[in-house]
Amino acid sequence: MVVLEPNGSSSAKALKSQNHDNGPGPAPPKPPPYGHPGGTYPVEVRPGNPNVRPYPVAEAYPPNGHRRSPGMRSLVSAIGWSRDHSGGGWNGGYPIPEGVSLERCLEPAQWDNAFSPNLLSLVGDSYAANQSAQDSQMLPLSPYPFASKASFELPISSDSLYLLSRGAYASGRVDILTSTAQKQDSAAVHVTVRYYHQEVRDLVKLCKISRRFGDRGVGIFTPRYIGRGNPGNQLYFETLIVFPQSTRRHSPLRIKNLETDVHNTFHQVHEIAEHVVFSDISLTGSNSHISAADLAADVASVQTSNGAILGTFNASKELSLVTSNGLVKVDVHLDNGSSGTPSKLHIKTSNAPLEANISLYASTSGVKSQYPQYKVDTLTSNNKLEVDFQKSPADSTLYYDGYTSNGPTNVQLHAAYQGSFKVSTSNSWGSPELRVREHVPDPSGRGRKREVEHSTLYKGVLTGSVKWVDDEKEDKRLEKASPTDSQFRSITLNSSRMTQCAPPPPCDLDKVYYWDFITFSVENRLFRVPKYRLVSDSEHFASKYALDASGDSGSEHEYTSVENPQLNAVKLDDVSADEFQSFLKAVYPMVIQGELELSEDEWLSVLKLSTKWFFNGLRKMAIERLEHFNLNSIEKVQLGKEHFVEEWLLAGYRELAMRYEPITVEEALMIGLQEAIQLNPIREQWIRQDQFQVLTETFINQSVQDTFVDNFNLIQNTQSQYQTAEEKEEAARVLEERLTEQERIAECEAESERLRTMEVEEEKKLADLMQELEKQREKLEALRPATNSPKLDVCISPRSSFDIRVCVFPLAYGLV
């Protein structure tokens, strides 16, 4: 069903009130005991506030009430480990993702063992005090008798802040909020772990981590687990991320990027939109809800599974809300500025209802767009779809696509909408229904009249259009409107997917030279290039911008409107148009013969973007070409650190250490004052060397590497990500040869051991045989008469350790 304009008693208002009247959202379910039918973690999600009992008072669970002596703890621990893990258990490995560096990890003795009934009490201000009573009701049921906590401070000036958890028992909840007690230049991360046994808690790695220069984060790692479980080994992590509140009125604090990637964890974002705005935020969880009381960002991505997404979300560029097997019930405020690029909203779930109130704005800050553009799609399956466009600016452009299956669809369009629409269903028991409210005032205030035309093409398909006109002249103006006018808007609703066999193509498409093109928008400049090189040369780039290798891509970026080419163009916000042009010159060279000739600045742009997007072959070529431009030592240090080129970084440090001219103030500022100071002792050694102490270049290299070990370690940790396909194949071949050589050596050692064993066994047999012959000889000697009779001779002549020759000369014996 499509409603072109909601009435005053629209159910959408009730939907919005339901999102806020029940507090910030339901609490996550408590992890069931291991071995429970259905798996380790809960799969079924039941919306609504669960009935939870309050936390036990601290006196009832004294932290030291069950502590044994160290000797007894060691004995009990050893017995328990032998019992619980005899058939599989902790394997000693931690699933730390590639590219993540552990800077500092908490030692077991550094945990604060004070029991904390409510983690929000750590904030220590009036906001937390007011929220404590309400939020404590949402804390999960906690049977854990012990709790330990630790805290980290991360600079808010970082390029990216992130929280990461991995491992068998890394489950819990994350709260994101602000506090006046928090320092203005940092964000606090408070982690409380609840547990039964200290021995299990001591296995947790709680670390300060980094990925690249300018990134800071906290990682929670528990070991992998294989085999049967013990309920007493469970852990539950409560993490609090606290940002400072802005001291300037009506000017919220801006955070560049916040990422969470925590499995089996519930997210709760408190009312922070008034105090904090994120340029980019990504919240990723699984098997639990993500709830936001009020979240504001330019670009936001929220993703979970087997859990609901609830709350209020504000975005100015792009918002993605994705879950599965979970309810989506949200209020969305989507702004569009003056860039000419549509603001995008993507909501998706499955096997659950999707209910969304959507408000579209020209802009809530900055310069308003004359023709705002929006692209919205909502998708679910096996359940209902309810979407209400509560606000929309006049003369705006809306592209909307809604889909569900095996469930009803109810979409209410704002009165400002004009353009075409299409509604279809494949269910034989129902047909699309259009409801139009009469005598609706013109949202633009120009006194126009709305005209609605619709028709049924065939059963299950309804099409039509909406126009705002006041006379014949206005009607003609709409027919000849520019591409930015609102009449080019369209809406498509599918209550079920229609399956249809496509006719055979008129001719075959060549697999190599039938190219699919893609359009990029960079600083209001459009680039249209073949997609194949971008997909084949970097899996990271293809994944980041939803590209695939086929010509029949399912991505939203496949086709570009001729009337409005910016509509489906891939927006690249973090690069300049000139840099991207230089990059494309290297990806799609215009020369047929000879080498590609680019300037130094162009090759630097190629290096920057190929490193950023992991075009490793192109990155290697850029490094080789830039070496011909005779980079100075300062440039080598800067570029080596920025683009992870170890050879340049080492050469730059070495040249600065071995030159006789001092490092100037300008150079020190360029490489960093601390590094300039650290280079001075090495320079002094080089300058003061004499005939009795001659320093070599190798010595200087080693001194530089020892002094700047953190910089070199960071680069070495990332080198595997920048290997070309040939380098990866060569590394795999060397590893295979090494393994083959080790296997051959092991086989030779096994064969040698077998021969040694056979030799020992044969020598033992020989000794036993000689002993037996000696006994026989003694017996024969005893039977010989006292008279001089011929002697019985036995000769033993072994020719080898495996050959025995026995010579016996039998004689006649007389019987007495």
Image (cartoon, rainbow, N blue to C red):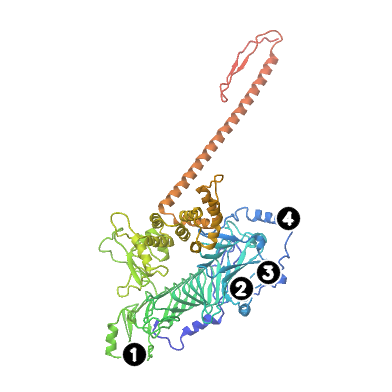
Residue 82 relative to residue 477: left or right: right
Residue designated by label 4: 71
Vertical comparison of 286 with 436: above or below? above
Residue lying at 27% horizontally and 82% vertically, measured from the top left: 480
Q: Nearer the viewer, mark 1 or mark 3?
A: 3
Image quadrant holding the C terminus, namely top right
Judging depth in this view, the residue of 340 and 44 nearest the camera is: 340
Residue designated by label 1: 449
Judging depth in this view, the residue of 35 and 106 nearest the camera is: 106
> Are the residues flagged by discs 1 and 3 in contact, CB closer than 8 Å?
no
Residue designated by label 3: 115
Q: CA separation, marks 4 and 2?
A: 36 Å
Rate crowding at label 3 as few (under 14), some (14 to 19) or many (20 or more) other CA atoms within 10 Å: many
Judging depth in this view, the residue of 164 and 662 nearest the camera is: 662
State the SS at label 3: loop
Q: Position of residue 322 (x, y in %)?
A: 47, 71
Q: CA separation, marks 1 and 3?
A: 67 Å
Residue designated by label 2: 139
Q: CA separation, marks 4 and 1?
A: 87 Å
Pick whichever of labels 4 and 3 is earlier in the sequence.
4
Q: Position of residue 291 (x, y in %)?
A: 53, 74
Q: Position of residue 111 (x, y in %)?
A: 65, 64
Amino acid marked by disc 1: Lys
Amino acid marked by disc 3: Phe
> Are the residues flagged by discs 4 and 1 in contact, CB closer than 8 Å?
no
Residue lying at 27% horizontally and 89% vertically, measured from the top left: 473
Pick whichever of labels 4 and 1 is earlier in the sequence.
4
Amino acid marked by disc 4: Gly
Residue lying at 48% horizontally and 64% vertically, measured from the top left: 666
Residue 447 relative to residue 59: left or right: left
State the SS at label 4: helix
